[in-house]
């Protein structure tokens, strides 16, 4: 059974029982009070009637001693209030105004100093019978006086009938009020249940409006806090999952260039009889790229999954760094028949070695994928920074696309990306690495002319002095 129905039925039952009990007690108390008043009045009248009888006995003592005639008591009864019955000393009926069905059993309990009160229904009429003994001038009589209290009984019946009507009208109005109150109380719970179902279906932004300051309002506030915590936790889980996917995709992407170099140099050693010095240089590049991959995997994890930005930047000779990059890329560029030209001004720059090489490899790899024949790497000192640029003579891109090329998984030429197994994640990673170095990427491109990318780096101590 739903809460609404439980509340409605329970409240209706409580009000119904309360009305019945209060009505019963009210009618019973009122009837008892009326009966007690009638009893007091009957006793008072009986005392008055008793004195009247005594006075008549004194006045008519001689005639009564000669015989207790009916005519005497008929005349005496007319002076008394109510209906009266007279009995002699042997409790034999002398005269009675009561109906023939009257039961005079109370005579057996009457004594000289005792009055007996009894309720009796005679011929459909309710009476109060008061019995007592009168002794005067050696004459003893038993008197029973009857007072009609049918009006009191009828009043109780009328009150009961009136209460029944009032009870059903009040109960009906109470049920309407309970219905409204039940709706008012349970409506927020229904809304809460609806919001909980929506959250269970994945709509985590569901919230409740708090319009009340009672316990229901407090519960709604707690529900909103819970929903907010769930939404934040789901967002964290989704973000963690996305970061792990980004890490896997980026790491897989970053394997291509060093593996190409490793395979190229290994193939060179395997297929050609090279002088010992060239074999040593090739082995050094293989070892260097293997170690870099080992280090790069951890740094990419920190950069992508943990969103770290506090990498240590070391001062390095830009000339040596670019020669290292050129040597690593030599097998791939030779295979693609692409010429790499370095035009570097001497300086020291602050970089994170593995991440900076990843940045350069991605920019050069994009240039190769654009179908270029020549790539120019330039380095130029400015007053407070050192600008490194990578330009090519490839297919270029529309100027309208430049604002989005650093978005993850965004590609300008999707068909070319599929042919070259591109996923559109290289430049997104490059943008993050540029942020680590306190810089941003600046792109210049024209269709069928080429593309140039510039990144500004911090100068080292020696480089800043010229």
Image (cartoon, rainbow, N blue to C red):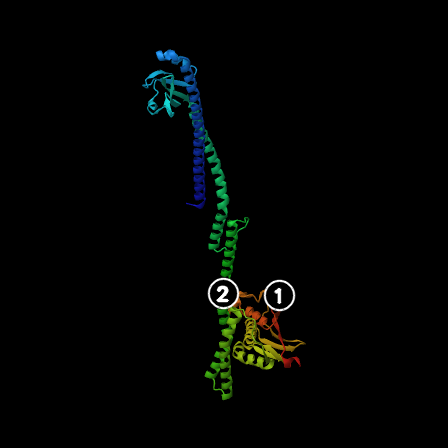
State the residue lying farthest toward the front.
137
Considering the numbered disc 1 on the image, is that residue within a helix, a strand or a loop?
helix
273 is higher (above) or lower (below) than 249: below
Asked whether 321 or 311 is in front, the reply is: 311
**Mark 2 or mark 1, which is nearer the start of the sequence?**
2
Q: CA separation, marks 1 and 2?
A: 34 Å
Give the numbered dot on residue 412.
Answer: none
Residue 372 position, x and y percent, is 57, 73
Q: On the image, which quarter does residue 145 sit in?
A: top left
Q: Quadrant of the C terminus?
A: bottom right
Q: Which residue is mark 2?
A: 240
Under circle 2, the secondary element is helix
Q: Position of residue 348 (x, y in %)?
A: 62, 80
When asked about the image quadrant of residue 322, the answer is: bottom right
Q: Position of residue 305 (x, y in %)?
A: 51, 68
Residue 381 falls left or right of residue 81: right
For label 1, the residue is 399
Q: How many marks?
A: 2
Residue that appears at 49% across and 50% down: 192
Answer above or below: position of 117 versus 265.
above
């Amino acid at each position: 059974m739903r809460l609404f129905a439980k509340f409605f039925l329970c409240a209706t039952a409580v009000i119904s029982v309360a009305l019945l009990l209060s009505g019963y007690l009210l009618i019973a108390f009122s009837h008892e009070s009326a009966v007690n008043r009638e009893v007091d009045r009957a006793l008072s009248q009986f005392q008055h009637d008793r004195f009247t009888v005594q006075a008549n006995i004194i006045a008519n003592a001689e005639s009564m001693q000669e015989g207790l005639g009916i005519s005497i008591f008929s005349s005496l009864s007319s002076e008394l209030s109510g209906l009266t019955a007279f009995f002699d000393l042997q409790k034999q009926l002398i005269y009675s105004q009561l109906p023939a069905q009257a039961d005079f059993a109370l005579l057996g309990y009457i004594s000289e100093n005792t009055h007996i009160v009894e309720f009796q229904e005679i011929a459909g009429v309710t009476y109060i019978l008061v019995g007592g003994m009168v002794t005067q001038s050696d004459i003893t009589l038993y008197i029973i006086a009857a007072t009609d209290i049918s009006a009191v009984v009828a009043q109780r019946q009328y009150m009961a009938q009136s209460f029944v009507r009032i009870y059903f009208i009040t109960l009906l109005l109470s049920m309407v009020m309970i219905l409204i109150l039940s709706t008012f109380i349970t409506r927020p719970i229904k809304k809460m249940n609806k919001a909980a179902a929506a959250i269970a279906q994945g709509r985590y932004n569901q919230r409740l409006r708090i319009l009340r300051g009672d316990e229901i309002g407090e519960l709604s506030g707690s529900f909103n806090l819970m929903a907010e915590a769930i939404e934040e936790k789901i967002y964290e889980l989704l973000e963690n999952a996305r970061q792990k996917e980004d890490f896997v995709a980026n790491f897989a992407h970053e394997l291509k260039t060093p593996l190409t170099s490793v395979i190229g140099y290994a193939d060179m050693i395997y297929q050609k009889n090279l002088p010992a010095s060239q074999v040593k240089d090739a082995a050094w590049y293989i070892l260097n790229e293997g170690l870099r991959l080992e280090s790069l995997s951890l740094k990419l994890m920190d950069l992508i999954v943990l969103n770290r930005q506090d990498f240590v930047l070391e001062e390095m000779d830009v000339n040596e760094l670019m020669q290292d990059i050129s040597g690593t890329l030599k097998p791939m560029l030779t295979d693609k028949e692409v010429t790499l030209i370095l035009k570097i001004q001497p300086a020291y720059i602050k970089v994170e070695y593995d991440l900076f090489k990843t940045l350069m490899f991605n920019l050069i790899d994009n240039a190769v994928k654009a179908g270029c024949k020549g790539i120019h790497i330039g380095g130029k000192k400015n007053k407070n920074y050192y600008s490194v640029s990578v330009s090519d003579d490839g297919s270029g891109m529309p100027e309208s696309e430049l604002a989005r090329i650093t978005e993850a998984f965004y590609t300008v030429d999707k068909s070319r990306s599929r042919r070259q197994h591109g996923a559109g994640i290289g430049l997104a990673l490059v943008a993050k690495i540029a942020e680590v170095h306190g810089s941003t990427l600046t792109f210049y491109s024209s269709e069928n002319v080429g593309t140039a990318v510039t990144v500004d780096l911090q100068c080292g101590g020696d480089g800043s002095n010229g």
